[in-house]
Image (spheres, helix red, strand yellow):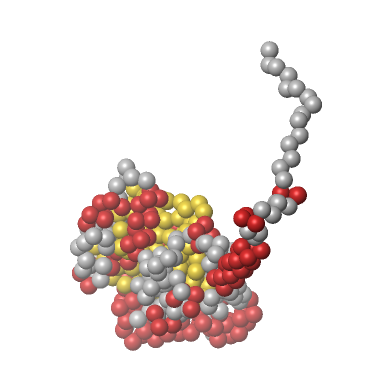
Amino acid sequence: MSLWLTDWKTDGREAWSGRRIMAQVGGAYAGHLDVYVHPSGQAVEVAELEVSPDHQLRNLASVMMDALYAAYPTAWINHGRRDPEGTQWWDRYSEPAPERNVHNRPPAEWAYYFEAGVVAAQKAHNAYRNRYQGVDGRREAVYRYGEPMEAEARQHAHLFHAPEPQGPNPQTDELYGGIRLFLPPRLHRVVHDSSRDAAERAEIVLDHLGHGSLPHYSAWNATERGAFEDLAHEEVFDTVSQQPVTHLTFRVLPLTDQQMPPHEVKATWVRFIDSPGIEVELAGMSWRSPQRPWLTHTAVFDPPLDAAIAPEYPADASPQYRARYSEIGDLLPGQMPRRAENASPYVGREAEIRAWADRLRQGIAQRATDRPDPASGQPAPADHQVHQQQSQQQTPRIR
């Protein structure tokens, strides 16, 4: 069995980070524990604990919960509401640090992080479950203070402080997105051939994928590690495909030169909403095989390549995207990966250049009409005579 603490991408609790402890047995998914983590790291709220049917009744849930306490050794833990299965499990579970369980302590100690009224409702729900299912649920630890929960909640409600949402800013921060690629076998071998130039291989992949096909559906992370974790996470739940897969990440520069597209900001990532085809500067790519994650290939583009996050719906693609990319994200004929380097100085000036050409032709015709006939014997104008002057100084010899 192995445990993996990783990011958990969720739309809830914007200011709190989603984290997941995933259990694998023999390399296969066995269960997970999802939590929200306060920005300070001093408070954790359990969202879901699940063990796959094939691995139940083996203490796997307890192992994951113990790992949570170890991963956040000083944080308050809020276990929330429990369902019938969770109620039975909790009655058997030996909690490693009950003094950090907010259900066991007065609100004055933890109300800065959790709303006292919400916790009181969770405790009431769990008490009902305990009575209904005929278990103790460590009632003495939870209710040893004797004061009604409603009174406690009202008294300490003012202590709660909701953290401000913080996360990466697409206008000032680099972002990392990822995609799982199933390349044709020959192309897969070329892309993972370390003897070849990394930038050359990266451009081969980009040509295959399409410069306008950067993923619109994935989260864009503040770190490359976060992007690779998303792909590894997706890999665990993919039990169908047997093809060799490549985990590919993109590094894009801040979106400083365009109107900011709609997006949702989370603690460590952003997601663009209904992408119309967002132009970006692609500064680098990294890729690896999930079977050999320690071998990562990295290419840096300096200057960066022009690319685009694909439209979520092709019919809603922006005019700027359609002018540069096809429906499948390929560059249209005549479009180059770097517009700044390859843009012709004559593009968009056709009418001006045509007017210049007309004036030149008219001038040539006019001069031909005004030119004297050589057969008439008319002398050439004085200003056309060639004058030569003899230099009075001699060039010194080189001795």
* Residue 251 rendering spot, x and y as whole percentages: 47, 59
Image check: 385 left or right of 222? right
* Residue 151 rendering spot, x and y as whole percentages: 58, 85
Is 311 located above or below residue 171 in the figure? Answer: below
Quadrant where the image shows the N terminus: bottom left
Residue occupying the point 38% across, 54% down: 202
* Residue 162 rendering spot, x and y as whole percentages: 59, 75
Residue closest to the eye, 201 or 75? 201
Quadrant where the image shows the C terminus: top right
Q: Which residue of the protein is positioned furthest toward the front in this rendering? A: 376
Residue occupying the point 45% across, 61% down: 337
Is 12 located above or below residue 29 in the figure? Answer: below
Residue 103 appears in the figure:
no
Q: Which residue of the protein is positioned furthest toward the top in this rendering? A: 399
Is 21 located above or below residue 165 in the figure? Answer: above
Residue 236 appears in the figure:
yes
Residue occupying the point 76% across, 30% down: 390
Residue closest to the eye, 214 or 362? 362
Image check: 272 left or right of 4? right
**What is the tally of numbered marks visible in this picture?**
0
Q: Residue 372 falls in which quadrant of the image?
A: bottom right
Q: Residue 25 falls in which quadrant of the image?
A: bottom left
